[in-house]
Image (tube, rainbow, N blue to C red):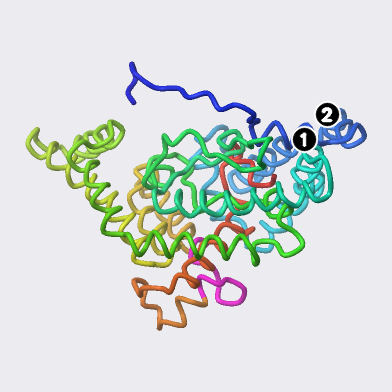
Amino acid sequence: MSSKLGMIEWLDNTRPLKDLIEESYNDNELDIITNQGQHPRKLYQDYVTNTYQKAKPTAKTANNTVMYAELFLSLTKAQVQEEFNHIQSVIPADLLRRAYYKIAISHEGFYTLRRQFITSYAVLCTSQYILGIGDRHQSNFLIDTSSGQIIGIDFGSAFNAATIHLPVPELIPIRLTRQLTQLMSPIGTSGLFRATMIHTMNALRENSDLLLSTMDVFIKEPLMEWMEHALKTSKQVAQNETNILRSDDTYAKDRIKSARLKLNGINPAVIIGSDLKLNSFLRSSNLKEARRQMEKVVGGDQIDSKRAQILLKYNSNRYHKLTVDEQIDCIIDQATDVDILGRSWAGLETFM
């Protein structure tokens, strides 16, 4: 709630998603990862570092913003897919699925737990998308081992803050990486998961007035990080104290506007592309081209990107109100795009 005051709730029968996945390696697979230097996170970090060093051979050090920007400036979509698929190849695709088999006491029990996971995660993803909850790494999810449901925790990065405030902006609208989608196989995201997301989004959009009215509290009492960001921005442009307070209010309204656009069915690629323009780390002149490339990657290509195809369908009208089905298809498409996953912050472990 603040730097000095908070609340903690203990949830019984829960395990972090990360723990369940990492405990599902067999001994041979674990030996390869630990003893042969094949840990996927190290491979991914090496891939990021090597890309930067090849592009800037005379440079000695760089901050994360500059280093990750090079992934967008130097690599084609095909190169990213090749590197990302190589990193994924050292990881069994079914680690989470194995964990659910261990939790279940029968085959029927596995399908029940799996169904509970799919429906709960679809509702969670849809709700978190509207609220712009970021920093969705594996440790920010708990699995209820008695029901199979997934529970989200740590909502410090809300209202798209992970795209706007972080040195390496997040470009995925929800977490939908391979371990999660493999548990949904053989139908994957096309079946129960998509249907539940559509049902949930319908309910949220039908009650958008109520939701937005509730969010008005963030305008009257902005989050501390919003006020800090507004203050930082105002200092950059040398505004006076009166304008600093107005800046707080304007920034809060902009964040609620982002939620409103989502409830109005605007293409998620358009929303994240707009938020990228607000990222202070990308404002320097030497990173403008990197930001443009980020926006291009977020927009997808018209050959195999659903979100780009839907934008073309409406004559490139970026703010056309999509149907709920189209909106969900765009969210899933963007969340599973290897071209984005392969350029994300290593800490998100998008290869898992």
Relative to 269, is 3 above or below?
Answer: above
Instruction: Decide which of 113, 307 is in the foreground and name it.
Output: 113
Work out how far the residue at label 1 is from the one at label 2, CA to CA, in angstroms.
7 Å
As for residue 299 lying within the magenta part, the answer is yes
- Where disc 2 sits, the SS reads helix
Relative to 271, is 177 above or below?
Answer: above
Tag 2: amino acid: Thr
Outermost top residue: 4
Quadrant holding the N terminus:
top left
Residue 74 locus on image (x, y percent): 59, 55
Tag 1: amino acid: His
Instruction: Decide which of 181, 206 is in the foreground and name it.
Output: 206
As for residue 175 lying within the magenta part, the answer is no
Q: Which mark is residue 39?
A: 1
Residue on which disc 2 sits: 34
Q: Residue at x 28, y 51 (%)?
A: 256
What range of the chain is rendered magenta?
297-308
Residue 303 locus on image (x, y percent): 60, 77
Quadrant holding the C terminus:
top right
Q: For residue 194, which quarter of the picture?
A: bottom right
Q: Residue at x 82, y 46 (%)?
A: 92
Relative to 140, is 131 above or below?
Answer: below
Q: Is residue 125 left or right of residue 185?
A: left
